[in-house]
Amino acid sequence: MAGSMEFPHRRYNPLRREWVLVSPQRTARPWQGEVSGASGFSTVHYDPECYLCPGNRRAGGLVTPAYESVYIFDNDYPALLPQADSAQMQSRSGGTSEPLLVAEPERGRCRVLCFHPDHSLTLARMDLASIRRVVGAWTEEYQLLGEEFRYVQIFENRGAMMGASNPHPHGQIWATEHVPDEPAAETAALQGYRRARGSCLLCDYAQCEQREGVRLVCENEGFLAVVPWWAVWPFETLVLAKRHLRSLLDLGEAERDGLADILKQVTTRYDNLFQTSFPYTMGFHQAPSDGDPHEEWHFHAHFYPPLLRSATVRKYMVGFEMLGMPQRDITAESAAERLKGMPPKHFMDR
């Protein structure tokens, strides 16, 4: 497959109902653009200046307790607030009735989840038991916040290159009153496919990737990770549940163990690729908590890493990507081949 498509073409993303331009012939072009600093590994287990290390005072004045496992708290500087003031918004907008100037209040809650008290760790370097505790915490938060809000977005920004403001191992959970654009688009695509085919889009896609094998990076009994056919970011991966699960709440104990394992497998391969602390944005997409059954939904995770050629050269979405459509140079198959070929053991531990 990889050798047969080394020419410009476009690929369809049925999950977003969009196209991506693939230009494999551009991999030979010289690079004279920005070269960023590599993301190194911390050797500091406790940083007295880190807001998220146990026992330290945060910027807002609150003290992070001396936690020993997972620690969760409301973001001190949240993007959303639990209460929305419709009257105040109407007065500040000037009461405009222009049909093209639309705004409405958005209520929500922002939570921070510290994965581990050890400042030096990442998911790739945590042991499976520790990651499994994070999976349990994600599940509890999804259930708790889903009782009040229509969507719960769990995500991690890893590394300064992806905008992480603190290197301590942590992620975020934003619960929103409305379903955000990305999961809303996926909901529409999954519903449309189910109506047209009578089956699940991502169940069918997972079976397709297992049959072909060329984009498969790693797998275990419950999950597989692939560089999707429609990948935009150079080493983007999609983690799929093998069973039709709508959300974290549907995972059995063995599948929660499997999720911890597949996350460690993927992040370890990322680090091994360029022997660096690999930056990425990772997030789970799962059924909205809006009261509908959402039988069409299939639990999955997206990894969007920016690195392109090395630990210091990143992919930018500019020019044609912003004004036309997403574009990538290396094929999904060649990216998967490189990731699959990485040792399963972290290079720092060998």
Image (tube, rainbow, N blue to C red):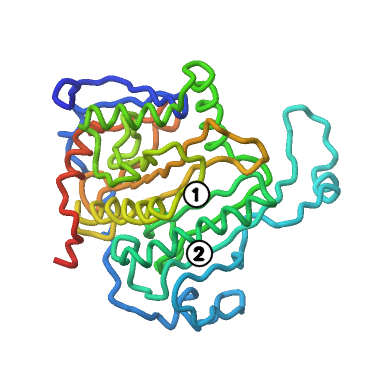
Q: Secondary structure at mark 1?
A: helix
Residue 42: image x %, image y %?
30, 72
Q: Is residue 124 left or right of residue 4?
A: right
Q: In this figure, which residue is indicated by the disc labeled 2?
A: 113
In front of the other: label 1 or label 2? 1
Q: First in sequence, mark 1 or 2: give its number.
A: 2
The N terminus lies in which quarter of the figure?
A: top left
Residue 51: image x %, image y %?
49, 75
Residue at point 37% right, 46% down?
A: 303
Is the C-beta separation of discs 1 and 2 under 8 Å? no
Q: Return the residue nearer the eye: 290 or 100.
A: 290
Residue at point 62% right, 57% down?
A: 144
* Alpha-carbon span between mark 1 and mark 2: 16 Å
Residue at point 31% right, 42% down?
A: 224
In the rendered image, is residue 33 in sight? no
- Picture quadrant of residue 2: top left
Residue 255: image x %, image y %?
39, 50
Q: Is residue 68 left or right of residue 35?
A: right
Q: In this figure, which residue is indicated by the disc labeled 1?
A: 248
Label 1: few (<14), some (14–19) or many (≥20) C-alpha neighbours in 10 Å = many
Q: Which mark is residue 237?
A: none
Q: Secondary structure at mark 2?
A: strand
- Picture quadrant of residue 173: bottom right
Q: Return the residue nearer the eye: 204 or 175.
A: 204
* Kind of residue sitting beneath label 1: Leu
The C terminus lies in which quarter of the figure?
A: bottom left
With respect to residue 63, does 289 lie above or below? above
* Kind of residue sitting beneath label 2: Leu
